[in-house]
Amino acid sequence: MKASEIKESDAPPRFKVGDRVRIRNMPNIFYTRTQNYVRGAIGTIAACTYKDLIPEEEAFNYDGRVEQYYIIRFRQKDLWEEYPFDNDTLQTESPEHWLEPV
Amino acid sequence: MTSRPELHQQYDLIHFLQPALHVPQNWNYENTHPLFQALTHPPHDVGGQPDVPVYHEEKEEEQWELNTYVTCEVLGWRGAWTAEERRRRADNDLGYTLYLGMPYYGRWIWSAAKMLVDKKHISLNELLEKIAEVRSRYESK
C-alpha cells in the first residue's frame, strides 16, 4: 500500500505525552520491531508521532490497520540495573497495540 | 517485565545457537565459493554428514502431532498449499537453527502458520493476538 493510500484512522490517540505505559510481551514469531529487552518494561510517552500501518501487517504487504505511533522513553537503569548513570534514557518507537496503560 | 537474569540467559542461549566465533562474522565482505556452497546448502539434505549416534525408540504420536498432521493435510485438500510446498517450507526454508532445533511436527505447524500469514489468509497480528489470548486463558486457570 502506498503512503498516499493510507486511510486516516478516526480513533483518537489512546495515550498522551507523559502517560506511563508497559510494552506488551507478545509471541516473537515471523517478524517484530519490538526489542526483547523492552518487553514488559514500563516507560513514559515522550511523543505522539504519526499514524501508520502496523509493522506486523505492513511487513507482509497485508492491507491492514492504521494505528497511532508513539515514542516511549525508558530509564536505562530500568532496563539494565547495572547501568551506571541515573539520568540516561533510551527512546524507542511503538504503535498503539503494543502498549498497555500502567 | 522479563527479569534481567532471565533475559541474559535468553541472550546467552541465542549466542550459543550462533556459529562459533572462529572467524569474524555478521556481513562478510567476501566468501569463498566452497563457503558459499556450504552456506546455501539446504538443511534437510543431511546424507553423508557427520552426526552423533541416534538411538531407536518407539514413540507414540502425541495429540498435538496428530492435530498438526490433520491440519496440514486439510490445508492441502482445501488448496492452501501442495505437499511439495509444505516440504519446501518445513524443510528447505527454515534454515539450520530451526530445522535442527524444532521437533518434527513443530516444523510442520510453524510452516503452516507462516504460509497462512504469507498468503494473507490471516494477518500476523491476528495470529499473535490469538496466541496471546489462548496463553492468558491457560495462565488464568
Image (spheres, coloured by chain):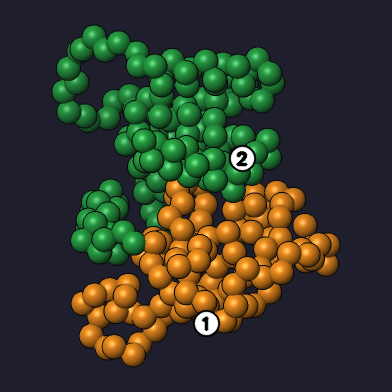
- The hue used for chain B is green
Which of the chains bears the disc numbered 2? B
Q: Is residue B62 left or right of residue B12?
A: right
Residue at left 43%, top 55%?
A25
Residue placed under numbered mark 2 in the picture? B117
> Are dots 1 and 2 on a single chain?
no
Q: Position of residue A75 (x, y in %)?
A: 36, 80
The N terminus of chain A - image quarter: bottom right
Q: Residues within 10 Å of mark 1 (few under 14, many from 20)?
A: few
Residue B91 visible within the image: no
Amino acid at circle 1: Gly
Q: Position of residue B108 (x, y in %)?
A: 47, 27
Residue B53 visible within the image: yes
Which chain appears orange?
A: A
Which of the chains bears the disc numbered 1? A
Q: Give the image quarter of residue B1.
A: bottom left
Residue at left 48%, top 29%?
B109
Q: Position of residue A23 (x, y in %)?
A: 46, 63
Q: Residues within 10 Å of mark 2 (few under 14, many from 20)?
A: many
Q: Which mark is residue A18?
A: 1
Q: Which mark is residue A37?
A: none
Amino acid at circle 2: Val
Mark 2: secondary structure: helix
Q: Is residue B125 left or right of residue B33?
A: right
Q: Is residue B108 left or right of residue B4?
A: right
